[in-house]
Image (tube, grey):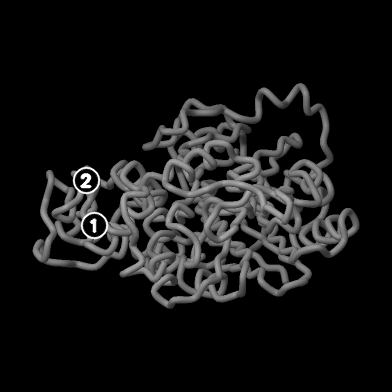
Amino acid sequence: MAGAATEGKLSPALPLATLIGRELRGDGSERPIVRYGHSGFAKRGEDYFLVKPDCLRVPGDPSSAFSVFAVFDGHNGVSAAVFSKEKLLEHVMSAVPQGISREDWLQALPRALVAGFVKTDIDFQRKGETSGTTATLVVVDGFTVTVASVGDSRCILDTQGGEVSLLTVDHRLEENAEERERVTASGGEVSRLNLCGGQEVGPLRCWPGGLCLSRSIGDTDVGEFIVPIPHVKKVKLPNTGGRLIIASDGIWDALSSETAAQACRGLPAELAAKLVVKQALKTSGLKDDTTCVVVDIIPSDHCSTPPALSPKKNQNKLKSLIFGRRSHSSVGKLSKSVSLGAVEEIFEEGSAMLEERLGRNFPSKANLPPFRCAVCQVDQEPFEGLMMDNVGGCCSAPSTPWGGPYLCSDCRKKKDAMEGKRSSRSTTCR
């Protein structure tokens, strides 16, 4: 299936001075065309994807449009993947304050993504089912791309000049030393499967449960140290646009990021997705579910062929010019000094500590009720064992002080459990 989030006749080429002026003013009137396609083959039938190209920040206002794409790779059944597909976006959007500007909306989005992932996990655990899922959710608003992910599904960005950038972090215990340290510090055990006679086989796993991932949604039968807190990265594409490839590990176990990008250059999004899947199957066979979503972000005054699909030329000369990086912790207004043609890194955060993720960058114009939980968005009265530690913070009476925004008792218990302070099984069935 293929589609376009914005359709219409191509505009004539604009003078360079006009383009530069619009860039410097932050003029959003020239929104890019977003075209997409997807493909996949099922072995277990546990992969799901989400395509919502026509979302609106402001109901009835086409200028507030944004697009959402996601891949969910389930394991131990499909329940968590199906639930996440149905609920994750809703929970993320409910955590974004209403009535704020586009700039404030984009700034609030990373925090809302964290809250939405955690709420989805809590709600699914209450169902008492044991399946789990990876989740890679991509929000495209103009040339700004925000990606949140848990697990080992992946999103890559291919821009003009052939530079390929990874927008996600794999949460595989085998490959991520920081996550191994976090899991063991929180009370989990990391080791390989031990056969009779003491022989260790297979990848590193977390015990109890035997999961190879350190972050996921669901997995009610493993420890709380398997957290749903996503890695989030936000970038602004150059005025030449780019291509996103979002796929499950059935693709990435067979193809490197560079190979996947190179394999489909020169093709429209739908054919590109099919070719990536075909190349993965050719390389390793159908060992796992394979799902691929390709998203092309195309300037409205360019030809219909995405510029990122052009053959790779002079990569060594262009490599140093493609990315104008900023600090991972930087947020706020987009830098106006980054040259056209560069990808600007606006924000990146991967901490698994909820206080660090929810306690930063709270929109000053949000005007939220003082006792609305920052995760589940439920308004509560400050009683029944809850107390304020400081302005904007609270905790349960027996717990240590909490410096982040207000959390209800259940979400506070979830936070403590994820940090290894106590179990939340009584409220979340894990």
Q: Which mark is residue 251?
A: none
Name the kind of residue labelled 1 in the image.
Leu
How far apart are the two marked residues, 1 and 2, measured between alpha carbons? 9 Å
Which residue is pictured at 48% across the width and 45% down the height?
183
Which residue is pictured at 36% across the width and 66% down the height?
425
Extreme front residue here?
Answer: 197
Work out which quarter of the rendered image holds the C terminus and state it. Answer: bottom left
Which residue is pictured at 77% across the width and 41% down the height?
258
Q: Nearer the viewer, residue 94 or 428?
A: 428
Query: What residue is shown with label 2?
Result: 402
State the SS at label 1: loop
Percent x, y of residue 360: 31, 41
Mark closest to the chain's N terminus, 1 or 2: 2
The reply to whether residue 169 is visible in this rendering is yes
Which residue is pictured at 76% across the width and 51% down the height?
253
Query: What residue is shown with label 1?
Result: 407
Relative to 430, is 245 on the left or the right?
right
State the SS at label 2: loop
Q: Nearer the viewer, residue 208 or 19?
A: 208
Name the kind of residue labelled 2 in the image.
Trp
Work out which quarter of the rendered image holds the N terminus and state it. Answer: bottom right
Quadrant in the picture for residue 90? bottom left
The number of numbered discs placed on residues in the rendered structure image is 2
Q: Nearer the viewer, residue 281 or 97?
A: 281
The reply to whether residue 6 is visible in this rendering is no
Asked whether the residues under the numbered discs 1 and 2 touch, taking CB atoms below 8 Å apart as contact, a structural biologist would say yes
Percent x, y of residue 111: 37, 50
